[in-house]
Amino acid sequence: MQQEVNQTTEPIEEELDLLAIFLKYMSYWKWFLLSILLFIGAGVLYLKTQPSVYQSSVKVLLKDENSAPEEMMLLQDLGMGGGKNNVDNEIEAFKSPDLSVKAITSLELYTEYRKTGKFWMGADELYQNAPVYIRWEDIEPESIPAPITFTFTPSGKGYTVLCEFRGSELTTKVDTLPTYLRLPMGRFYVSANKHADPKFTAEPYEFEATISNPMVMARKMSEQLEIKPSTKQSTVLTLSYSTETEAKGRDYLSMLVSYYNDDASSDKNMVSRNTSVFIEERIKDISVELGDVEHQVEKFREANKLTDIQAEAQLYLGQTGENEQKRLELETQLNLVRFVEDFIKRPENRSKLIPNLGVTDAGLVTVINEYNQLLLQKERLQSMSSESNPALIQLKNQITSLRGSINSSLANVRHANEIAIKELDRMYTVTHARLQSIPSVEREYKDIMRQQEVKNNLFVYLLQKREETALTQAAIAPKAKILTRPFTTDVPVAPKVPVILLAFFLVGLVVPVGCIFVRDLFHTRVENIDDLEPLKGIDVIGDIPIIKAKMETALVVKANDDSPEVELFRTLRNNLLFMLDEPHKKVIMVTSTVPTEGKTFISINLARSLSLMDKKVLLIGGDIRNPQINNDLGIPKTSIGFTSVLAGHCKDYHDAINELFPNFFIMQAGPIPPNPNELLSKKSLDELIARLRDEFDYIVIDSAPVGVVSDSFILSRVTNNTVYVMRQNVTQKDTVHFLNSIKRDARLNNIAVVLNGTIPENRYGSYKYGYKYSYRYGYSQKYGYKH
């Protein structure tokens, strides 16, 4: 049954604890209000220092080169198709610092103009609207060693210019524009900005111009560039960049897309140019060879006086026509293979694309196309990274491996053609045996004509490809098509005012909590009634404020006195009487943990308050080791007291009792015994208390502190209730756990706590008294006796 009760009460205790914590922090509401106001004010000041940032965006469509127009098919026919776009690779290409530096250099974004901020205000950027234009002469932008800042301050009709470079400062004067500034670090051209908006140049003001290395700026801007595909399968990309000025973001994105298309076109043109060079070289060679063959035909015809040899030959060679056609095709393929082999063997062609001029072997064509694609990717990646890039090294290894495969394939194709030609030669020999009647001149003439036809076919084929390559160069379309021209949001994307103010509000809310928590963490003494909340089964029956006014004695409770301190002791008395609701409960022991907590003060005034009810009350000095009642009351110390009666030195206990006021009697502690514990353990204590119960209505015992000696635990056998005194800023907080253990072990009877020496405060809170009454005293009177 007891377990069930505990289970039902646990949630209530937890709820009460949460409420207590809330009320505790709410008591510092002024702190919270001040902190929130301060931090929100700091947030407003912070927002004033932050410039408004606008986001510019542009949508582009990456063209799929597999579905490219007719001109791209020409490159694929030459074995140089581009392949399919990889969106991730194109995103990295857009974010390449090398690409960004071109846009920055073209727009001169590496020179930043700002209006000088006043006091704590931020500096506004003056993109294209600065009163002057400045340029570093005699040096390439990418060679700028370090940022240099010029501060232009209006002075008369010109400017006073402060130059800051690598920690050094130099001041000069500009009276007329345009002009050249000759400084130790270089020469600078300065002119009026005729394209600036008039509203930015109507009145003179101070501004700054900072020239930086564009590559350093490109790395930063590339990181800030956001690129997102519309969908996972889409080649539509959205490029976004945030800037302080709307025009700057739009210009940067437009120029970035333009240079991206230029680079892509340059890659494609490089393929066409290499192919064109190769074709021109082969046309020259074939022209010479074809001229030699035709001259040989001319001489042969003149020498043998031949007219229509072909008509005569057809009469005898009808059966060999098909074989001759095959031989012609094989020799053509063999010559093409040899041309490609000759191209590959040349050292100067090692990094050039390998042309595929009509080779019919499908495997060889596939390997050549793959090799050309890898070579293009290598050159593109090489332009955007260093030689130590793992991806570049891997591409080079793949290219080397494929080049070996191409050499092997060419050798195999050439060997296969040679074998086929030998086989056709064998068949020709057989046919020749059957055609012995044909004059040898016919055969010689046929050989010459065959050579002429092969050379002529190659020459015509190369001329056709030269025209197609020229057409390809003229018809290359941009790779990235702009779907939506660059636009800028009307509302700034940063700073986010609601988010920042909410953050400062939350910080203003958390800081007081942290301060209070840290303060409580380092405060180990009881500070207020809230620190007594962990008491288990022990009621707090009152708090007594500190009395700052000086008084002669510790007795503050007087008859016919309605002062606040007397009312507090009346409240303490009434709460205690609720606990003493049975006639036999008369003996009240007052103790504490350590001295200086005011237990004697509480004992005296509690006993006096009880006597004012026309009850006969006896106050006993039970602290026989350190008696203080006579000192606190300002009365002489008697030689006969509590210890005298217990030790048997006083036969009549009435001799140790003195009446101080009507119904208020005192038994002082008496002489300090050598054996206090043994004296209190005697049966004489029980006999004395039993007699006093019959004679007095209430007995109040001022006992020794339980944290110092064990006398109070021995006295508890004759007491009914224990008033445990704690003192604000004196009693340690762990006394609560100590008192809980005393309660758990039943070492003291019916414990009730009084908090002494409190400082009245206007705070939220609740006191946990015996019958769940809540009290709060809000007076600010100043009292004397410091107890």
Image (cartoon, rainbow, N blue to C red):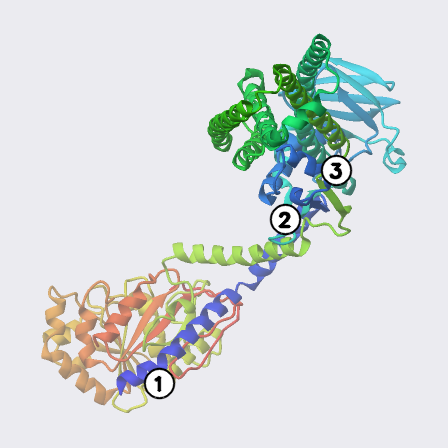
- The answer to whether 633 appears left or right of 445 in the picture is left
Q: Are marks 2 and 1 in contact (CB under 8 Å)?
A: no
Q: Which residue is mark 2?
A: 228
Q: Amino acid at mark 2?
A: Lys
Specify the quadrant of the image occupied by residue 8: bottom left
Dot 3: what SS? loop
**19 and 301: which one is in front?**
301
Q: Which is more foreground, mark 3 or mark 2?
A: 3
Q: Amino acid at mark 3?
A: Ala
Residue at 76 percent across and 22 percent down: it is 135
x, y percent for residue 105: 72, 27
**Which of the labelled discs sits on residue 477, or is there none?**
3
Residue at 49 percent across and 70 percent down: it is 23
- Mark before the other along the chain sequence, 2 or 1: 2
Q: Amino acid at mark 1?
A: Leu
Residue at 46 percent across and 27 percent down: it is 408
Q: Which residue is mark 1?
A: 577
Position of residue 438 relative to residue 718, above or below, is above
> Few, some or many C-alpha atoms within 10 Å of disc 3 (few <14, some 14-19, many ≥20)?
some
x, y percent for residue 174: 82, 18
Q: What is the distance, in whole Å, between disc 2 and disc 1 at their CAs?
A: 79 Å
- The answer to whether 261 appears left or right of 630 in the picture is right
Dot 2: what SS? strand
> Can you see residue 434?
yes
- The answer to whether 331 appears left or right of 577 in the picture is right
- Mark before the other along the chain sequence, 3 or 2: 2
- State which quarter of the image contains the C terminus: bottom left
**706 and 17: which one is in front?**
17
x, y percent for residue 99: 66, 32
**584 and 766: which one is in front?**
766
Q: Which is more foreground, mark 2 or mark 1?
A: 2
